Image (cartoon, rainbow, N blue to C red):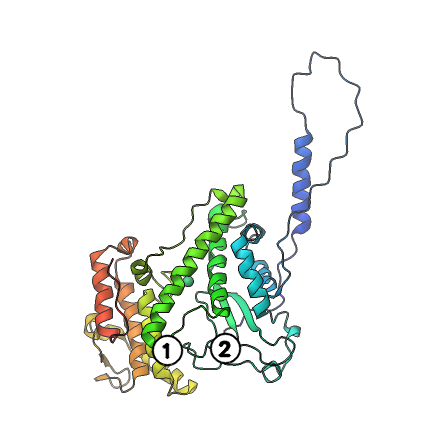
Amino acid sequence: MNDPHAFEIGQFEPDLELDELGEMQADGLELEDPGVAHEVFKPRPQPKAKPKPKPAPRPAKPNCTGEFRGALCRFARTGSVPDDVLLWLEKSRTFNAIVKTLDQKYFDPFPPNRLPKNWDALWAPDANGIFTQGPHTGRRMIELTRGLASGFCSPTGWSGTACVRDFIQLKAPPQTAGPGKAASLAEKGGWLERIAHESVHAWRHVLGSGPAGNTAGKRIQSAIDDEIVTRKLEGKIVKEAGRAVASFARYPPTTGSTEQWKVERDFFQEDWLNGLRATHLEYFVLAERLDAAAKSLTGTKRLALEVFVDRIDLGKRPLTTYLTQNPKFVHPDSGIPTTFQDDYSRSYFMRRVVDARWRAVNRSRVRDLHRDKGLEKVRQDHAKAFFSGLAKYTRP
Ligand SMILES: [Zn+2]
C-alpha cells in the first residue's frame, strides 16, 4: 500500500485545560448559592466565615501512556475527538486488554524525531512490516488518520509496493451538536464505536488472527469472519463502557449485524457518499482478483493501467452491458469498442462498474439493504459476472 501520510505533524489543538477548569469552578460556585426561603422568620444566624469553595477537580484526562495509546491520543487531539470518548473506552475491560497488546506490538513513529532517517535500513521491517532489527524489534509501526479505509501490512495482502506501516483511518461521525457546541452523545458514541472497531481489527491482525488463507476463497471467507468477530467485540466494548458510565448508558449502539449473510451484503465503507460503493463480498473478491493480477506487474505499470481505466467513460454504453467476464468498453482515445488485454485492468474496471451501478440505485431503497429484492438482483448480477467462482452470497 502506498504510504498515505500527508497530514501535518505537530500541529496540535491549543490546550483547552484552563478554560475547562474555569468553567467547572464557576459551576461549583453556583452550587454554593443557598437560594432558599425557609429561613426568613428565623433569627438570622451570625454570618460564618464562608468556607472556601473547594477547587474543582481537574477534569480527567485520558491515559496516553503507551505506543498505541499515544498514537490514539494524538489522533484524538488533532481530530477533535472529545476526551470523554477515550475516558469511556478506558472503562471497558475488553478494550483495555486489546490496547495493552497493541501497545506492545506497535511503535508510534510520531513525533517524527522518534524515527531515524534511514529507519528501514536500520530496523529492517519484514513483509508483515515487523522490525527485525534495532531497539523495537518485533514491533510494527502504526498511524491513525482521518479517512475511510484502514490497512495492515501482510505478505498476502493486496499491497503491490512494500508496506511501510499499518494505518487506521477513522471518519468523524456526523456532528450532531453544530459547530462550536459540545459534542452530543450520538457523536461521542459514534467515535467510540469506530475507534473500538478499528482497534479490534488491528488487534486481530497483530495476533495473526485476521484474514488469512492459502487460497483466494479461504481469504475471502476469513475476511468476512474477521468482520463478524470484530463487530461482536465492538458490541461488547460498547456494552462494558455503558455499564460503567451512566451518561453513556443511554447511547443506542449502532453496531452492524453479525449474521454472515448480512455482513456479506453490507457496504464495505460506511460512507455511502464518499467511499467506493461495494458490498463486503464484492470488495474482498475484487481485491483478490486485483492482487492476483498485480503480482506480475510493477507499481508504475499498475498505475498506468489504473489511469487508463479511469479515463474510460462508462456512460458510453448501458451499465448492464458491462456485466460479463470480459466487458466491452469504448476506448477513450480511438472511440472504438474494445476489450481488455490484461486481468488487472479488467478487475479494476469491474470495481468501477460495481461502484457506478450502486450509485445508480435509488438511495431510498438502500434503507432496506438486506431484504430489498431489487438490491439483491444487483448483488447477484455482480456475483455472476465478476466473482469468477471465488465466492457466493450466503442465503438468508
Ligand atoms: Zn470492520
The image quarter in which residue 334 lies: bottom left
The image quarter in which residue 96 lies: bottom right
Between marks 2 and 1 in the image, the one whose residue lies nearer the viewer: 1
Q: Residue furthest top?
A: 41
Residue 1: percent from left, percent from top = 46, 77
User: What residue sits 26% from the left and 55% below the top?
Assistant: 365
| Amino acid type shown at disc 2 | Asn
Do the CB atoms of the residues marked 2 and 1 lie less than 8 Å apart?
no
Badge 1 element: loop
Q: Is residue 12 left or right of residue 46?
A: left
Return the disc, 2 or 1, that comes first in the chain's sequence: 2
Residue 27: percent from left, percent from top = 65, 37
Q: Is residue 311 left or right of residue 43?
A: left
| Amino acid type shown at disc 1 | Asn
60 or 217: nearer the eye?
Answer: 217
**Could you say which disc has been placed on residue 128 in the image?**
2
Badge 1: few (under 14), some or many (20 or more) residues near its Cα, within 10 Å?
Answer: few
Q: Is residue 194 left or right of residue 394?
A: right
**Could you say which disc has been placed on residue 214 in the image?**
1
Badge 2: few (under 14), some or many (20 or more) residues near its Cα, within 10 Å?
Answer: some
Distance from disc 2 to disc 1, alpha carbons, whole Å, reads 16 Å
169 or 215: nearer the eye?
Answer: 215
Q: Quadrant location of the C terminus?
A: bottom left
User: What residue sits 37% from the left and 79% below the top?
Assistant: 291
User: What residue sits 37% from the left and 83% below the top?
Assistant: 294
User: What residue sits 26% from the left and 65% below the top?
Assistant: 393
